[in-house]
Amino acid sequence: MKDIPKERKGTVLVNFKLHGNVVKVLDRLVESGLYKTRVDVVLSALRVYKPFQEMWKKETVDATES
């Protein structure tokens, strides 16, 4: 992954398969207007999930320093 430009790494990391029922729930949340895309739903969930909070803070700090 070193040869992938930094702006594309995020896209590669969120490219995963979800169970059909999960996709239906994501679509309903998007249709309700709470989120713009499925990715926004997943990212919001990760931000509040405690094990990822420290990693999220570190990544956002690193991104602002770049």
Image (cartoon, rainbow, N blue to C red):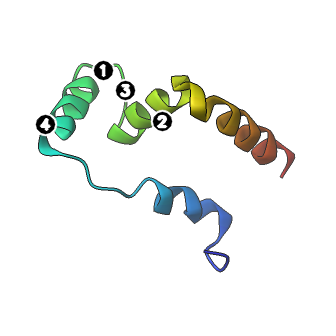
Residue 43 position in % (x across, y down)? 48, 36
- Measure the alpha-carbon separation of dots 2 and 4: 18 Å
Q: Could you tell me which residue is drawn at 40 percent across and 41 percent down?
A: 39
> Could you say where residue 49 lies in the image, as x and y percent from the top left?
51, 26
Q: Is residue 47 left or right of residue 59?
A: left
The amino acid at mark 1 is Gly
Name the front one of labels 4 and 3: 4
Residue type at mark 3? Tyr
Q: Do the residues labelled 2 and 4 touch (CB within 8 Å)?
A: no
Gap in Å between the C-alphas at discs 4 and 3? 18 Å
Q: Which of marks 1 and 2 is in front?
A: 2
Q: What element carries label 2?
A: helix
Mark 2 / mark 4, whichever is N-terminal: 4
Give the label, 4 or 1, closer to the camera: 4
Q: Mark 1 points at which residue?
A: 33
- Distance CA(mark 4)–CA(mark 1): 19 Å
Q: What element carries label 4?
A: helix
Discs 1, 3 touching: Cβ within 8 Å: yes
Looking at the image, which is closer to me, 16 or 39? 16
The quarter holding residue 52 reads top right
**Marks 1 and 3, how far apart in space?**
5 Å
Q: Name the residue under label 2.
A: 43
The amino acid type of the residue labelled 4 equals Asn
Crowding around mark 4 (Cα neighbors within 10 Å: few <14, some 14 to 19, many 20+) is: few
The residues bearing labels 1 and 2 have C-alpha atoms spaced at a distance of 16 Å
Distance, label 3 to label 2, CA atoms, is 10 Å
What's the mark number on residue 35?
3
Write down the residue under mark 4: 21
Nearer-N-terminus badge (4/3): 4
**Structural crowding at the residue carrying mark 3, measured as other residues with C-alpha within 10 Å and reported as few (<14), some (14–19) or many (≥20):** some
Find numbered disc 3 in the image and state the secondary structure of the residue it sits on: loop
| CB atoms of marks 4 and 1 within 8 Å | no
